[in-house]
Image (spheres, grey):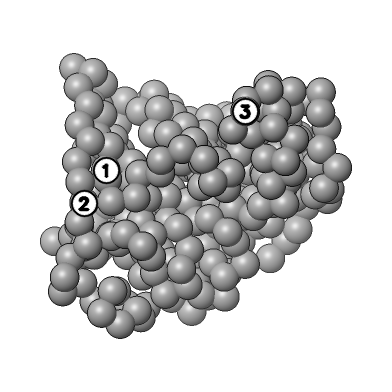
Amino acid sequence: MIQKGDAGLEIDKERYKRNILLPEVGEEGQKKLAESRVLVVGAGGLGSPVSLYLAAAGVGTIGIADFDRVDVSNLQRQILYREQDIGKAKAELAAEQLQSRNHSVQVEVYPEGITAENAEEILAKFDVIVDASDNFPTRYLLSDTCMKLGKPDVYGAICEFAGQVTVFASDGPCLRCLCPEAKDPSGNPNSAAYGVLGVIPGMIGCMQAAEVLKLLLGKGEALIGKMLFIDAKTWSTDLIEVPVHPQCSCHAHTKVHRM
């Protein structure tokens, strides 16, 4: 783990003026954000906008977990990176970008990513977990571990022109309530297999960031037990209820499933 930055509890009232003007935030809410810790798992299409907006909002500590390196095909949608970054480690680059935008934010880098061996130890350090990953094994691992630890898991997914957002939490459903097992556990359901319009991860990532801020502030109605779908081709939206599955293994006895 590499630490960058020095999060302070003194808030810059001028910098965060537009936040503070909101009755739901105010100075106390801004201090809450400064004292909060959020882990973003995946520094790609979703993780880029999530982490940028959380840093801009003044979240005190942001963890970035990603073992990948920048590929030229990432540049179409992963707005943290530039052409000169090709071949470099995403987590380190993401930390540098966040620090350059807000020096008061502390960034913790986990270049090994999240694995079954380290998931519980790392996730336990944070208040909210953001699932910005792109594969089923990581998604299930995050959901299972969050349920065990009682941490909210802000989930986002993208494919082609569409995306979806929800919050898995101990007082609501988890990923296994929605889909007990992946049809193809080793597969990538997102952009690598089917493609994605470059702006879609930006839209969904911003929605995930909004859910994180609502959870940290304790304001608004989080998408717990609900999943929001959006299709940019038609601008159709659907908000569906996701119930707790009565036979879900995570709710019956929380444990981390190895895949």
Q: Quadrant of residue 243?
A: bottom left
Counting residues from the N terminus, which is met first, the one under dot 2 or under dot 3? 3
Alpha-carbon span between mark 1 and mark 3 = 27 Å
- Which of label 1 and label 3 is nearer to you? 3
Marker disc for residue 23: 3
Is disc 3 surrounded by few (<14), some (14 to 19) or many (20+) residues within 10 Å? few
The residue closer to the viewer here, 135 or 37, is 37
Q: Are marks 2 and 1 in contact (CB under 8 Å)?
A: yes
The C terminus, quarter of image: bottom left
Q: Position of residue 88 (x, y in %)?
A: 60, 46
Please give the residue where the numbered disc 1 appears in the rendered image: 227
SS of the residue under disc 2: loop
Q: Nearer the viewer, residue 24 or 118?
A: 24
Which secondary structure lies at badge 1?
strand
Question: What residue appears at the point 54 percent right and 67 percent down from the top-left corner?
Answer: 123
Q: Residue at x 69, y 47 (%)?
A: 32
Q: Tell me if residue 247 can be seen.
A: yes
Q: Amino acid at mark 3?
A: Pro
Q: Quadrant of the N terminus?
A: bottom right
Q: Residues within 10 Å of mark 1 (few under 14, many from 20)?
A: some
Tag 3 secondary structure: loop
Name the residue rendered at 20%, 46% in the picture.
241
The kind of residue on which mark 2 rests is Val
Residue furthest out toward the front: 23
Residue 98's spot in the image, x, y percent?
68, 39
Distance between the alpha carbons at the discs numbered 2 and 1? 7 Å
